Amino acid sequence: GAVVSQHPSWVICKSGTSVKIECRSLDFQATTMFWYRQFPKQSLMLMATSNEGSKATYEQGVEKDKFLINHASLTLSTLTVTSAHPEDSSFYICSAGAPGSGNTIYFGEGSWLTVV
Amino acid sequence: SQKIEQNSEALNIQEGKTATLTCNYTNYSPAYLQWYRQDPGRGPVFLLLIRENEKEKRKERLKVTFDTTLKQSLFHITASQPADSATYLCALAYNTGGFKTIFGAGTRLFVKA
């Protein structure tokens, strides 16, 4: 199946700083990528839809100024958590739909963010 | 709003038995429904997709059924193995001018040797 890679796998940052998470589609081009957040034992919550070359579409309740999304190329989307706080600590996962895969979504391995 | 319900309690079964996981949803039926496996601390891995006009899909030891009347999907793992222990997520995709996917909270499966 198609491969989606995330980096870093885990990151620890200080409160008030910003951290960037990358999501790459390694063997296909993705015009659309998705960013999710998952708390322990809870469902994946869609944060935003990242569109190549245009602004991301954020879900209700997600602060666009706090979670900056950039989809500058067909293989890379980035999520920047700005002015991070401990409550932002979570598991962030990206996904993309591979063309010709029948709308199957492929997920990255996820990125653990801990804000101290 | 659309809601997805999966067994919130963990499912414990003996190796070799068939595991059956349930996914129920409210309101309108999705264009298609998917099942994913998620191991602790890892991203979900796609298993099977079934469309609204399909009743059943199989892949090796896995079987998925989709009943739009009952608004329910069942996910079966036959001849279960301890390696099948994981959380299984049900995901529904709706065409809202682009496909939007909503995930259930998942059911944790434990297969005992």
Image (cartoon, coloured by chain):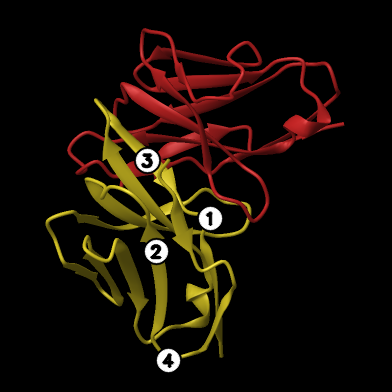
Q: Which residue is at a point 18% across and 68% down the rendered structure image?
A: B56
Mark 4 vs 3, N-terminal side: 4
Disc 3 crowd rating (10 Å Cα; few below 14, some 14-19, many 20+) is some
* Residue B23: mark in rendering: 2
Q: Examine the rendered structure and indicate whether residue B113 appears above or below residue A58.
A: below
Q: Which residue is mark 1?
A: B105
- Name the kind of residue labelled 3 in the image: Thr
| Point 58% across, 25% down: residue | A61
Report in which chain the residue with disc 2 lies.
B
Label 2: how many residues lie within 10 Å, few (<14), some (14-19) or many (20+)?
many
Q: Does residue B7 lie above or below A8 as drawn?
A: below
Q: Residues within 10 Å of mark 1 (few under 14, many from 20)?
A: many
Q: Which residue is mark 3?
A: B101
Q: Position of residue B13 (x, y in %)?
A: 52, 87
Circles 3 and 2 on the same subunit = yes
Q: Residue at x 36, y 8 (%)?
A: A53
Q: Comparing marks 1 and 4, which lies closer to the viewer?
A: 1
Examine the rendered structure and indicate whether residue A91 appears above or below residue A53. Answer: below
Locate residue B110: give its quadrant: bottom right
Who's yellow, chain-wise?
A: B
Q: Identify the residue position indicated by label 4 in the image.
A: B16
Q: Which subunit holds the residue at mark 1? A: B
Amino acid type at circle 2 is Cys
Q: Quadrant of the C terminus of chain A?
A: top right
